[in-house]
Image (cartoon, rainbow, N blue to C red):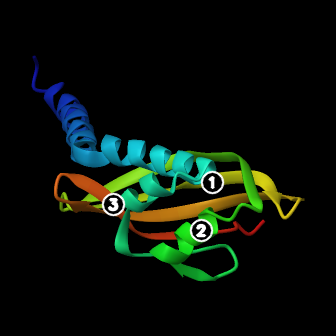
Amino acid sequence: MSFRMAPRLAPAIFLCLSMRLAAQDLRPGAEQVLKLEEKWTAAYKERDLDLMSTLLTEDFIITVEDGATYSKAGYITHTADATVQVEVAEQSDMHVRMRTGMLAIVTGAYHERGHSKNKLYEYHDRFTDVWVRTGNGWRVLSSHYSVPVK
């Protein structure tokens, strides 16, 4: 290799190594947290209160679209409401940021459609969920939903 080519090759090698290290930083726990997000969404849609209870910390708090906040008990009570039938609950555009191996922040888009008291409703939200490592697993500490401004 000539000395003229080395300055061109060095930045490319550095970029590849940086990208690989960044990808590795996101791996520990990130896939597990994304799978738990999917389980949580399915549990909400199907009203699986037992599963939901295991996914939320005891001091869990959620802020919903209108600014109301609910504790773990309040959120589970809302989920158990038989006058609400969730037909579609799906997440997309999800990104996980891992911090200190003990904290995961998930952002994404959420779409929900169903019936509440026999009236059709539909939400298109953005969300942020904060997960904490507890023992060998992860649980949701906080969640925030908002309606994007158009």
> Quick check: marks 3 and 2 in contact, CB under 8 Å?
no
Label 1 element class: strand
Mark 2 vs mark 1: which is more N-terminal? 1
In percent of width and height, residue 96 lies at 38, 52
Q: Please tell me whether residue 49 is drawn above or below residue 36 in the rendered image.
A: below
Q: Quadrant of residue 8?
A: top left
Label 2 sits on what residue type? Tyr
Label 3 sits on what residue type? Arg
**Residue at image x 26%, y 41%?**
27
Comparing labels 1 and 3, the label whose residue is closer to the camera: 3
In percent of width and height, residue 28 lies at 22, 44
Residue assigned mark 3: 139
Q: What's the distance in space between the residues labelled 3 and 2, CA to CA?
A: 18 Å
- Label 1 Cα neighbours within 10 Å, binned few <14 / some 14-19 / many ≥20: many
Label 2 element class: strand
In percent of width and height, residue 99 lies at 24, 61
Q: Nearer the viewer, residue 73 or 60?
A: 73
- Label 3 Cα neighbours within 10 Å, binned few <14 / some 14-19 / many ≥20: many
Q: Which mark is residue 74?
A: none
Residue assigned mark 1: 110
**Residue at image x 53%, y 49%?**
43
Mark 3 vs mark 2: which is more N-terminal? 3
Q: Nearer the viewer, residue 75 or 130?
A: 75
Position of the N terminus, as image quadrant, is: top left
In the displayed structure, does residue 111 sit left or right of residue 56? right
Q: Which mark is residue 145?
A: 2
Position of the C terminus, as image quadrant, is: bottom right
**Residue at image x 58%, y 71%?**
77
